[in-house]
Image: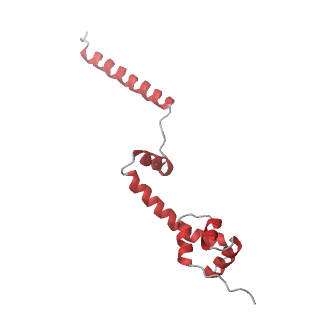
Amino acid sequence: MARPEKEIDWSLFEKLCELQCTQPEIASYLGISDDTLRSRAKKQYELEDYSDVYKKFSESGKCSLRRNQFVLSKKNAAMAIWLGKQWLGQKDQSKEAEQMLTTFTNLLQQLDNTSKDLVQAPAK
């Protein structure tokens, strides 16, 4: 006689996936082998591969993490800057860009001074 299958708490499995736990971590927590976890998850969720099952449940964990990052960014400037760089394509100004901006500002100031001089010059 074969020994009876160990019961798996599938809602716990789903929560561990949401937390981005690795397959060995999940298997260890549930007290089963990696192979058993893979085969039983495929059977339980009727999907082709364990990675499909894992992806299905880990995505909602990413949503939760993103939500927490947004909340944290309201109080933490470093998090807001990081999110801006990652998702909005923002970046720190380079030294070269700062020099170009300074040069441009100086040129505008010179142009402004020149135009003032022309306006104030006596007509001949």
Say which residue appears at 60% left-offset and 70% top-offset.
29
The residue lying toward the viewer, choosing from 117 and 91, is: 91
For the C terminus, give its image quadrant: top left
**Colour pattern of the rendering:** secondary structure
Left or right, 47 with reference to 72: right
- What residue is rendered at 66% in x and 79% in y? 40
Q: How many numbered callouts?
A: 0
Q: Residue furthest bottom?
A: 1
Residue appearing at x 50%, y 29% in the figure: 95
Residue 53 lies in quadrant:
bottom right
Residue at far top of view:
124
Q: Can you say whether 38 is above or below 89 in the image?
A: below
Horizontal side of residue 108 vs 23, given as left or right: left
Q: Position of residue 33 (x, y in %)?
A: 69, 72
Q: Quadrant of the N terminus?
A: bottom right
- Res. 41 image quadrant: bottom right
At horizontal 39% and vertical 48% (from top left) the residue drawn is 76
Front position in the image: 107 or 23: 23
Image quadrant in which you'd find residue 106: top left
x and y, in percent, of residue 9 in the image: 56, 78
| Residue 14 location (% of width, % of height) | 55, 73
Residue extending farthest to the right is 1
Of residue 122 and residue 88, the one placed in the foreground of this image is 88
